[in-house]
Image: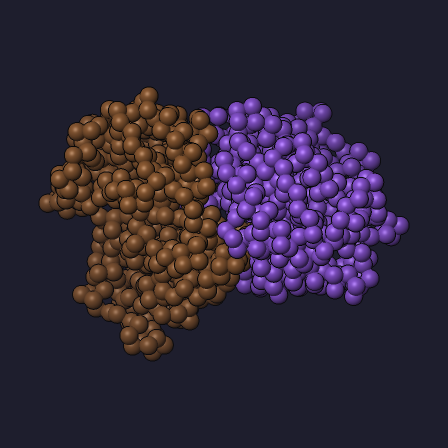
Chain colours: A purple, B brown
Amino acid sequence: MTVTQPRTAEALLTALSRDLPGDALITGPEATAPYAADRSGSRPDGEPLAVVRAANAEQVRTTLRHAHALRVPVVPRGAGTGLSGGANAGTGTVVLDLSRMNRILDLDPHDQIAVVEPGVITAELDRAAGEFGLRYAPDPASAAISTVGGNIATNAGGLRCAKYGVTRDAVLGLDVVLADGTPIRTGRRTVKGVTGYDLTALLTGSEGTLAVITAATLRLRPVPERTATVAAYFDTFAEGAEAVSALTAARLEPSMAELLDGPVLGAVDDAQGTDLRSRGGALLLVQCDGQAAATEAERAVRLLRGRATSVETTDDPAEADRLLTARRLALPALERLGRVLIEDIAVPRSHLAAAVREITAAAERHDVRIFTLAHAADGNLHPILVLDPGTPGIPDAAWQAAGDIFTAALRLGGTLTGEHGVGTLKRRWLADELGPEQHALQHRIKAAFDPHHILNPGKAL
Amino acid sequence: MTVTQPRTAEALLTALSRDLPGDALITGPEATAPYAADRSGSRPDGEPLAVVRAANAEQVRTTLRHAHALRVPVVPRGAGTGLSGGANAGTGTVVLDLSRMNRILDLDPHDQIAVVEPGVITAELDRAAGEFGLRYAPDPASAAISTVGGNIATNAGGLRCAKYGVTRDAVLGLDVVLADGTPIRTGRRTVKGVTGYDLTALLTGSEGTLAVITAATLRLRPVPERTATVAAYFDTFAEGAEAVSALTAARLEPSMAELLDGPVLGAVDDAQGTDLRSRGGALLLVQCDGQAAATEAERAVRLLRGRATSVETTDDPAEADRLLTARRLALPALERLGRVLIEDIAVPRSHLAAAVREITAAAERHDVRIFTLAHAADGNLHPILVLDPGTPGIPDAAWQAAGDIFTAALRLGGTLTGEHGVGTLKRRWLADELGPEQHALQHRIKAAFDPHHILNPGKAL
């Protein structure tokens, strides 16, 4: 990480206060402290030098131009809801807060396209699209609080990925500003196009290290006319995982398949006074959508009956919401128990049960409490470490358990992070997944965008 | 383009003949001439210096290592079915032919993944997947003759893109060899994953300019259990285009919507003795698939009835094949009329009719015969210029008509190439679409992969 010298800091603040409106610039440790960390549970050393609350692309350009000239690190930030430290901003950095750039610039129901600023809350876009019978298909669990720009920066997944893909699959084009303040427009308004390298895809998931997003052209999709929801309880998480495999093997393509382990159900019971844990050691929630939703759900029920201890189904939205409540309340319930550290491995779908066995073994080996939920149709697991709230930082045992889990994910042919990003927390394992040659190549690509390493240094790579 | 000096050429041939098996190396202008061009209708100056018919990744590495050390340009090649000159290989180049690397290495019906060598014919993979009730969703019109590696190099589209996406959406990971012979593995076997920059997506569509693909990990999808096909005739192409817009506006998501203009129908009639042109000035072929295929096709028929001169529908595969025959026979029918130059613009879906008006105007302005078919649900049009077979090269009038069409596509918010790639033929318009700053950035990315510009120089960028 670059160290910003006092004279450089002063020169930057002078330039920014001269060239930005007064309400755009925040300075002083107390005022900037709320911008120092994301929701990962980790904190950098110190507070940012300054926060620029940009109102438009021109202010983004101004900020980057000055920071680039003075070699001051810039940390782009949406709503700060990231879970891997990607928006953490320590001493000597400038936070470029994009949450004020929150306009939907265009919503074209004919071409099924939206053009939005990066600070638009994901659920707001979905709601606006809904007025035309459309939706923004990516559905991160954080949709109510996270921004589209942050979703793009991490290539966020969510609950509907198995059928509808991840954020990348919905991004057609980007307006970005490069490290030196140069604006470029990647991609297009068409659903297909192959002119030049696919910088739209490269920027998606680059965690603010290659450029700063100032607008995104997004693909919308029709809202399915019908949805059917199935809830099934199993004795063990492994049996639930195998049931999901059976659905896949039967060529069903549910739009959602969420699996919660017994300890998560117990935590929800404790928080909500419900009685889920007594019904089974794992809960599987399956949703089918489209014209044939009911037929597909019936097929799912037939397949699950032989394996589950109980199965219930509904095509009533309110009843479906009730069934999904356990999933929605899982994280708040765990947050009552301690400080949570949310991991995010993905494995080939057939290895879901094996991955859970590895997670359980790691928890026992290092005496760490780990609760697990999974986007099961994707093979994406969230082992959630619950830490003692009194202990500052991340204890060694937690790092070791996480390390064992990552190593197991890679051994099973999987990945360190399915949808949250590398940020700062997973960097120590990055080279294990990429290999030294690809890691070096990725650094050369970074340098092609940002030769002086001012954009979110120390993250992602 | 680098000029290869005679002594350099000799040194390379000496090294390759020493380090490769005898049957892998082809030299001499007569033997290498068949590898000089793709199916774009353009030809480079001269013949390649040598052709390496690689049997495995090790031979790819050997070839690149020597070519890199001696700075000799290398042109990767699959089946040579490209339409934009991307695999053209002139004097002083080495063709790296990957068509012998044609094994399906793994086909995992459980994880719905295939791992293949780049020379596998696309339709062969689809057939192999079909034995497990799966398919390789991208469906380029060339599937019977093109390779998976070539499809990835161009990010090929096809007939099912509107619903199932393009090649990029099916590629999970790649084994590639960098310009200097270094092997790397990008991506993973999981359906989600965000560790590091998305080099899999960056390499897809890079037209052999960044690395050479030696294996691909691909996502398979269940074969839809039902399919229904609708054929509708219209008085004009514009009315057909508006009918497709009406389907989209009604939130239908057909898996295919192919639109053929009157002159194409006339050419098919002349070739096949059919009687299509008398039935209308445009033919629209719509396919719906999935459990609800019949319901969706019925809705499509209701919407089309008021607009079309006639509508017919079927859920019988043989009858559907009969309806699709006109589409399949279009290109061979046009090839009987002269030398064809196939263009490939895409526009926002609502501008399809406007794009066709521009194409017609360009044809009249420059007195060039242009026939048009479209993947209408994608806004992807193929204006096909039919040239006098007696005239060598591409006449000025054809370049001018193509230029007018590209300019119109960009003005309508579209792109130069929806699915075929830039190759050599569209490079002169590339900067118009990318802008100078993005163009320069793409060159810096190229240099991060291939600092000495040996991989397919003079293409794509």
User: Which of A97 and A423 lies nearest the eye of the viewer?
Assistant: A423
| x then y, percent, for residue B139 | 36, 48
- All told, the count of numbered labels is 0
Farthest-out residue, top: B306
- Residue at the image point whose x is 26% and y is 70% from the top: B26
| B220 up-or-down from B324: above or below | below
Asked if residue B452 can be seen in this view, the reply is no
- Residue at the image point whose x is 46% and y is 50% from the top: B222
| x then y, percent, for residue B408 | 33, 29
| B181 up-or-down from A154: above or below | below
Farthest-out residue, left: B390
- Residue at the image point whose x is 72% and y is 60% from the top: A359
Question: On the image, which quarter does residue B297 sit in?
Answer: top left
Question: On the image, which quarter does residue A62 sit in?
Answer: top right
Asked if residue A280 can be seen in this view, the reply is yes
User: Which of A384 and B440 lies nearest the eye of the viewer?
Assistant: A384
Q: Is residue B6 left or right of residue B419?
A: left
Question: On the image, which quarter does residue A412 sit in?
Answer: bottom right
| x then y, percent, for residue A272 | 81, 39
Farthest-out residue, right: A390
| x then y, percent, for residue A405 | 70, 61
Q: In this view, does A271 lie to the left or right of A173?
A: right
User: Which of B155 and A30 lies nearest the eye of the viewer?
Assistant: B155
- Residue at the image point whose x is 79% and y is 38% from the top: A33
Q: Which of the image's four quarters has the N terminus of chain B?
A: bottom left
Q: In this view, does B221 lie to the left or right of A380?
A: left
Q: In this view, does A166 lie to the left or right of A269?
A: left
